Amino acid sequence: MITKPPIHQALHAPIILALDVPSPRDIEVINSLPNPPLSPLTLDHIYIRQCRLAGDTVDAWGGCFRHDDLPKLLQLSQGAPALIGHSYWWLRQLPPVARFFGGSIQEHRGASYIVPKFYWPRKHSQAEDLKTLIDASIINEASIAFTFTAASCSICGEDIRECTHEVGKDYDGKSCFYWYDGIIKVLEGSFVYRGAEPGTGFLEKPVSPEQSGWLHLTINGIDYVATKTPDK
Ligand SMILES: [Zn+2]
């Protein structure tokens, strides 16, 4: 039997509004990641934001995560690096700028999304630049890169590359797409400038309501209410 190689896919999704407060639990999770920080971090060492990284909607490629796979996807994102624009560090020698940790699965406009948090060190020479670009919504979307083993046709269940159905075509009123089955690994998440998945956009940061004012954002035609955090 011939084993098919894993499929590598990259999707776009939004960074989203985060209303929770960075907590000691966040620090605990960060310091418990695989390959944890060599010097244990505290809240004073890092910035934290969070993003809606992937969901169970059909994306621009015609692919879709199964709802039941979202917990596994969130688990696989733990400790994954965050890059700028899929600038794969092994190709361009650019290091990651942040790292994913924790998070939850959240509902948004009728779909479910994994919403991991990410942190980056305040001492990095470009930490303030990244924060400024994210908070000003210049960098306003996130994208996930992952590998999986099977692209299962939504109509017949066979490999979409081998069956007769075509992505996007209607079959008895059902539009054909494919499932991301056998998810192996989340390679990285990237901060990007334009997403491909409907209803996506960038987001805000964990902040306490007491610290914040309210900021209304319109991203990709969608209104978000975001908390506005004063610099610490
Ligand atoms: Zn098919």
Image (cartoon, rainbow, N blue to C red):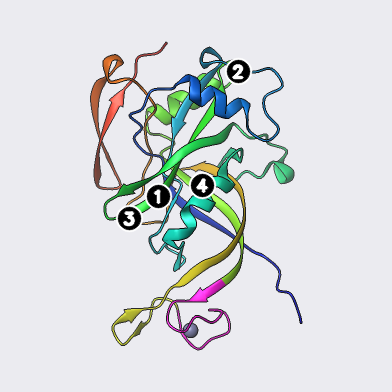
Q: Is residue 65 above or below residue 99?
A: below
In the visual, does 55 lie left or right of 199? right
Check contact, mark 2 vs mark 4: CB within 8 A.
Answer: no
Q: Is residue 33 above or below residue 27?
A: below
> Is residue 222 or residue 133 the one in the foreground?
222
Q: CA distance from mark 3 to mark 1?
A: 7 Å
The boundaries of the magenta stretch are 151-166
What amino acid is labelled 2 in the image? Leu
In the rendered image, which residue does mark 2 sit on?
41
Across and down, in percent, residue 73 comes to: 53, 52
In the rendered image, which residue does mark 1 sit on?
113
What amino acid is labelled 3 in the image? Ala
In the rendered image, which residue does mark 3 sit on?
111
Label 3 or label 4, whichever comes before in sequence order: 4
Which residue is painted at 49% across and 24% down in the image?
25
Quarter in which the C terminus is drawn: top left
